[in-house]
Image (cartoon, helix red, strand yellow):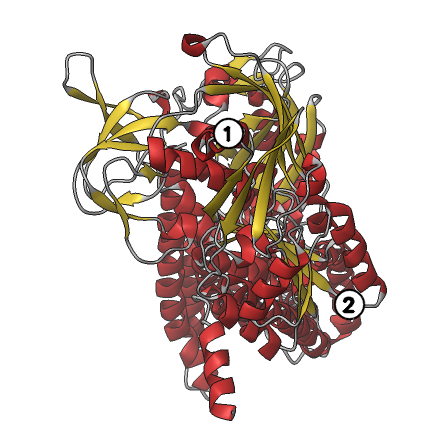
Amino acid sequence: MQAALPFAAPGLAMPDAAGTAVPASSAALDDPAEWAAFGQPIDGDAAGGRWSSQVVVEGMHCAACAFTVEAALAQVPGVLRAEVNAATRRARIVWSSAEVQPSRWFAASAAAGYPLVPAGDLQARAQRARVARLALWRWLVAGFCMMQVMMYAYPAYIAQPGDMSADAAQLLRWASWVLTLPVVFFCCGPFFRSAWRDLRQRRVGMDLPVALGMAITFAVSTAATFDPTGPLGAEVYFDSLTMFVFFLLTGRWLETRLRDRTAGALEALMNRLPDSVERLAPDGSFVRVAVRRLQAGDTVRVLPGEAFPADGVIVLGDTSADEALLTGESRPVPRPCGARVLAGSHNLAAAVQVRIDAVGGGTRFAEIVALMESASLGKPRLAQLADRVARPFLIGVLGAAALAGALWWQAGPGHALMVAVAVLIVTCPCALSLATPAAMLASAGSLARGGVVVHDLQALEALASIDTVVFDKTGTLTRDTPRLDRVYSRRGVMPGDAVELAAALGAQSLHPAARALVNAWQMQHRVPPDWVATQVSEQAGQGLEGVLQRRQHLAGAAPRRLRLGAADFCRVPALACDATQVHLADEAGWVASFVLAEDLREDAAAAVDALQAQGIGVQLLSGDRDAAAREVAQQAGIRDARGGCTPEDKLMAMRSLQAAGCKVAMVGDGLNDGPVLAQAHASFAFGKAVPLAQARADFIVLGDALSAIPEAIAQARRTLRIVRQNLAWAAGYNALCVPLALAGWLPAWLAGLGMAGSSLVVVLNAARLARPMARHAMPAMQAREQGA
């Protein structure tokens, strides 16, 4: 993701397969080897199937820009879907590689005035840095010229009749005009280009009213300067124009900085992979190569301070790693020789050698980035409503400005035009469009830094209204993997042989009980079982069935069909104990039973207490035995618990709660809880074993802390409050300022200050959500203890 794509020299063009001229830099992207750098195949067929690509859109400022890009891309044959987020300035394009090449839709967006750059590419970051420097220069030039123009305008404001000659007044006008030229032709350039681009596309963008206001003000003032005795001779507003531009650029620059910060969690994740790494060569030396050239099985050397380039196992050396953005663990994690390391985490202590197991899209890092990209491109319901309102509102703004000019025309053409300018400027709906996405993205970034990845921004709105939380037990309230406590086996079967059979079959599942048996065998023997499982099928919430065959070097034993799982599934009687138990059976009947010990997570009771302190009801639904479920519930402080639930039972219980009017969040391990996670109003997939790319939950908890659940709910409630505050501010601002502008009581410079200030207030208010989440669980416990 980090390496720059081999773009050709800018300015050159070449025809594509359809005969359309496309930039050579975009045509380089038609090489299928480059597609994985900014996208991934959907169908698994990289050559001729569908792809989902992530790009950065340059030149975007508002929701209207996003509409333009989406429309331009949708017109390209072979582009199946285009989703553009104005707040993050990113787009996701779903396209068919059999029908279109990337150069076609890159060219279509560029023709609409919005060039695309592959997400995560070095050129994208370099281009953003150039744009930021240029914006700063525009702001500095506007500020300098504004101060000089104000100095020249000041004498005209304070001079009494006869204090200043007509020639002196005219000289000051000419000086102001000269100083206004760089403001209009350099500082205002982005507004004019954006407006012209929208007009060519027959669209109304948010920069159009602003550009019209600037052009009208400059034209009226220029006419007065060139013809001081004409009908517009008294209408000179160079000071208002330069002040307005300075305020607008100030607001837009600050808004961009703040918006980049609030959406910075995704960028921080994407930029954690190094550009290159030292790879072990056949002669024993280390050669630095691009990360994208790594393959599974390679051995690399990672130095202190560098990020691990892929998932792998340390084969030489001991170190510690920073995995804060990947697992939510804020403290360094020890990683001795033999430990697994994750792509994107940072090596802190010493140089180590790592054998690569997974690269590119197969890493946990890539799965997290894909989830965050999906969230950053989503549009919550409130944001969609604001986007729908924005365009007709802009048309209304143009109509209101024309009406204001007509009503004030009798008072003088110059004054009428300036009233129209004030209406054009003050009513730009930038704040309305930013109100929801800025807050949602800031909140998603804060949650990500706390170890909770938001899969769907819309879920933040649902999570804020939650009044009931339902927990799964195994791998959720308890630790990810239980431990094997006792083994019972039938006569003639050694307990160790039973564990070996169960581990061979359990290796085909991600269920915590199956992982416990696999771990028990590996801890004892350090080698794989001598059985190979085939024809394996898994029944969610019940168990596994498959055929076990001895490995080739121990051939001769007949294959055995075995079942591993619940007592009913294995058709054997349950043990007379309340602990979690797993059974193994073959065609002859019972083979063995395994008693597992589950350890409650350290912060489970504190998390439950924090939820109840927020007025949220807590329940437990488990597929384990009822007695075991109630014992864990009692330890966690949950009064309402039910065991022996199949996935269907959990789904029926969820529907019953919803039918009673409850707003329910489900917290599960994501393995056999798919239906109930999908049914809940909001859902959390908990546990490191969850395949993130396949999770159906709205929120993915990366670390081990159950306190993330009450923190996420509290954050969602704060988010919705701030969204409502932003929407109320945007509506109230327009309700107050539009009548003032129509009445002629709002000069152009003050209208510009108000428009820039309104957008800045919205983004500043949203930025409060980007701060690290406060820990709610322990304060809630302390408050209850003090109250007692």
Residue 112 visible in the picture: no
Q: Is residue 324 left or right of residue 196?
A: left
- Tags 1 and 2 in contact by the CB under 8 Å rule? no
Looking at the figure, which quarter contains the N terminus?
Answer: top left
Choose top left, top right, bottom left or bottom right for residue 709.
Answer: bottom right
Choose top left, top right, bottom left or bottom right for residue 627.
Answer: bottom right
Residue at image x 62%, y 28%?
108
Please tell me which of labels 1 and 2 falls first in the chain.
1
The numbered dot on residue 736 is none
Question: Residue 457, position in %: x, y?
Answer: 62, 54
Choose top left, top right, bottom left or bottom right for residue 589.
Answer: top right
Residue at image x 21%, y 44%?
319
The residue identified by callout 2 is 662
Question: Residue 12, position in %: x, y?
Answer: 45, 18
Specify the amino acid type for callout 2: Cys
64 and 310: which is toward the camera: 310
Relative height, residue 297 to residue 177 (above, below): above
The residue identified by callout 1 is 493
Which is in the foreground here, disc 1 or disc 2? 1
Residue 771 visible in the picture: yes
Alpha carbons under labels 1 and 2: distance apart? 51 Å
Relative height, residue 407 to residue 787 (above, below): above
Residue at image x 44%, y 86%?
158
